[in-house]
Structures are given as C-alpha cells and as structure tokens.
Image (tube, rainbow, N blue to C red):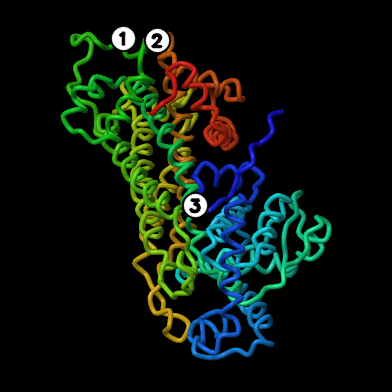
Amino acid sequence: MNEIPTVTVGIGPLGIAEVVAVARGGAPVELGAEALDEIRRSRAIVDALADDPVPHYGISTGFGALATTHIPLERRTQLQLGLIRSHAAGSGPEVEREVVRALMLLRLSTLATGRTGVQESTARAYAALLNAGITPVVREYGSLGCSGDLAPLAHCALACLGEGEVRDATGTLMPAGEALAAAGIEPVTLREKEGLALINGTDGMLGQLALAITDLTALLQVADVTAAMSVEGLLGTDDVFAADLQDLRPQPGQADSAANLRAVFAGSGIRDSHRDPAACTRVQDAYSLRCTPQVHGGARDTLAHARLVADRELRSAVDNPVITLDGRVESNGNFHGAPVAYVLDFLAIPLADVASMSERRTDRFLDRARSNGLPPFLADDPGVDSGHMIAQYTQAAIVSELKRLAVPASVDSIPSSAMQEDHVSMGWSAARKLRRAIDGLRRVLAIEMLTAARGIAMRAPLTPSPATGAVVDLLRAAGWPGPGGDRYLAPEIEIAVDLIASGQVLTEVAVVTGELR
C-alpha cells in the first residue's frame, strides 16, 4: 500500500488538492521550519505588547462591542478561555468530518504565516489533532460568515483546550479531554491574542469551497458523459459538437465540453445507423441535446472563476488584528467572507441549470413522441410496467430543490454584536447549501446515466460508442441487470450514484478516450 504523502504547512499557500488530501484523504501534516520561525517571531511581538499601557485589541481589551474594555493582565487567560467557550455556541446536526478537517487545516495554514501571534504550542496542537484523526464536533448553525466562521472555529479551538466533544479516528464520540489524553496531546493554555487568532477566519466556507471545486470538476465531466449517452440513445447527432462550430463562440468551457462530447461519442454504431439523410428526417435536435456544450461550458467557466477566488483566499492570512510584516498590530476587515460567499452562491446557479438540462434529456427517453422509437417510459411491457417513470419524478424533485438552493445566501445580512458587526456575508450558509446541491446534481446525473444506459441497451443490436459502452458495462458489472420488467429501482439508482461518486465512471471512460477536459 502506498503511503499518503505528508502535507507541509508553511508560510505560503496550500493548494486545493492538498486541502482535499488532508480533509478527505487523511493525509498527515507537518509545520515547515520557516513557518515555525515566523510563529515564534510574531509571538514575541504580542508578548512585548502585553504590558503596554496603550490598549491593543484582543491583547489587552475585550472583543467585538466590548473592544474598549481594558482587561487586567491577571485575567487575560480567563478572557481567552471565555471567548472560546462562549463562541462555541453552534447548534443542529454535526458537520461532516471532511469539512471540519478542512477548516482546521486552513486555520493552521493562517497560523503558520506568522501573522496571528499564536504560541508555537498552539499551532502544533492543531497539527497533532489532524494527525491523530481527532475531529471536533461542529454544529450546522452558528456562523454568519463575518468576523470569521466564529462558532465552527470556536468548537475546534475548544477541543484543543481539552473541552467539548470530538470524534476519534474510529468515529467514536467522546469528551475532547479523553481523546487528547489517549493520543498523548497536551491541551493548550491560551495566552493574549490567541482566542481571536483561532476563530477569526473564513476557513469553514473556504474549506467547503475547495471540496466543492474538486467535486464539481469531476461532476461536470460526468455530465458530459451522461449527456453523450443521452444524445446517442435518443438518436441525436454529434455534428453540432464539431470544433469549428464551437470556435465561432470562443468560450473556453464550451470548447472543453464539446471536445469531451466528441470523444465520448466517437465510434458509435448507433450514430452511424442514422447518418443517411434519407433515413433521418429530423433537421435539429432539441436544445437539451444540441446546447449541451453551451450550458456545461458556462458552468465550467463559472467554476474557473470560483477556483481563482479560492486560490487567492488560500494565499491569504485572515485574522483580526494581524501582525504585519513590519511588526505592527493592526485591526482590519479581512475576515468578512463576501468574496468567498459570492462564488459559493454563484456555483449553485449553473449547478442547478446543468441538473435541469439533465432532467430534460432523461424525460425525452420516457416520452414515446420524443424518444425516436423507444417504448413509453422504457418499460418492458408498457401499461403493465412503469419503467423509469418515477425515476424521472425523483430527478424532477431534486431539480426543484436545486432551484431553491440556487437562491443566494450572500444577499442576506443580520446585524449582530450590538451593531458592531452590522453587515455579514452568510458565506457559511452559502457553503452548506452548495454541499447539498452537489449531492443533488450527482443523483440527477446518476438517474440520467441509468436511463440512458437502458435506452442504449434497447437499441440493440445497434452498438454504442466504445466509451458509452464502457459505462453500460460498468453498470452491469456493479449489479445493474439491464432492461426488463419492473423491479425495485432505488438500489439501481444508488449503484449509479456510487459509481459516479467513486470516480469509476470517469476512470472507465478515460481508458477509451484519455483524460477528459
């Protein structure tokens, strides 16, 4: 078995792939030597300011609306501890393990820049929790996406103090103190400035954006595959995907989608069966077939913009106050989540549209007036059997939900902290609904794939393209029995969902086509 490479957290940015490797793949982390030097240097600056009679926010003062309250030296440890305890006020279902690991890694990345003033022991504790597989319990609700993802990050900080609840590497729920003791990790004792440094970040929404970008990159390739299967099974044409036609509108995502469609479609015996104009009287395919590159391409270009924003945010050191390179301690507003919130919302729009187009292609298979010779609902014995009728209902229900999830969270704002925090981003909420939307898109595409595979099989003895045929074979190998009488359909849908989620669909297609764009 290959050992998972260690991710080094330094003063420079992490890449999206590194975030996913730690969050989802369990890759170990280590702090770089240069990062440790910067952490020590900035901590010395905070220590020097601790006795300064001039108030410094977060070092010798309260927080938020209490920023003008001076805190005596002997009470500052209590101040930091109280900040974390009081801000760990989340509620609702537990957030997924991969999301919590992503936000912890990204907070550690900001600590490693040396712009936050934390103790070296605090940064090492975050790395130790990640490496031990200890995951703090973070709740669904609590972040407004401004002053950072306060409640989610506070729950993580609380675990480093040996308080609150965590799940260990086996997923067992237990008190944080017990988990840290079992792993040989010393709980952190916070000093001046550290409470703020652990919770003033966009790490929750950014971590979810990194995961979403990874998932959507693959899902848009899957969408090209399922679309090609549908066009083929519906006796559509691939002529409209020709490169010279796409070049007339030089949108990069459109060109990539069309190239994928051509590659997946290549060598189709089904397509060859209706190339003769005398045998095919249709002039044009419906928009849900013909305009696939335009819609899938627009989604790709939106995703490219989101990746640009994510890469910039990964290069950021988000905290308030920050230790500047020349040693100043300055308040700022970089914790506001607007840049990330906007693209989280933006991604939900094309995602819903890609799913909507997929549902329309699926529906065409089920209508004998539009399916070009296939039986109603792809039923084995129409009238007795219902075929895929209700599978399309499931798609329609999901698509309707995706349209609601496309309504932006970032246009909302609820003032908090006695009007000190009077405009917030709601970026965490945007991230949460995007995760739900991604799951919905995956299920919509799975139903299209299953329906198209059934339609293609019903075209026998005509043969599909090598790539679409590989997908049909993959489904059969996973337990899909192919066309036939009515049967319990939900498990077959889950087979398709799992094949997409695991990456097996793209792997099988790539054997034929090479890596898709």
Which residue is nearer to you in this view: 30 or 196?
A: 30
Is 31 on the left or on the right of 413, as rendered? Answer: right
Crowd around label 2: few <14 · some 14–19 · many ≥20 (10 Å): some
Which one is closest to the eye, mark 3 or mark 2?
3
Which residue type carries mark 3? Arg
Residue drawn at x 61%, y 25% as measured from the top left: 478
| Residue 54 against residue 274 in the figure, above or below | below
**Residue that carries the numbered disc 1 in the rendered image:** 273
At which x and y percent is residue 282?
20, 20
| Residue 294 against residue 46 in the figure, above or below | above
In whole angstroms, how far apart are the C-alphas of marks 2 and 1? Answer: 8 Å
Contact, mark 2 vs mark 1 (Cβ under 8 Å): yes
**Residue that carries the numbered disc 2 in the rendered image:** 462
At which x and y percent is residue 349?
34, 50
At which x and y percent is residue 97?
63, 53
Q: Looking at the rendering, which quadrant does residue 412 occupy?
A: bottom left
**Residue that carries the numbered disc 3 in the rendered image:** 436
Q: Earlier in the sequence, mark 1 or mark 3?
A: 1
Which residue type carries mark 2? Leu
At which x and y percent is residue 476?
57, 21
Tell how many labels: 3
Q: Which mark is residue 426?
A: none
In whole angstroms, how far apart are the C-alphas of marks 1 and 3? Answer: 41 Å
Residue drawn at x 23%, y 36% as measured from the top left: 251
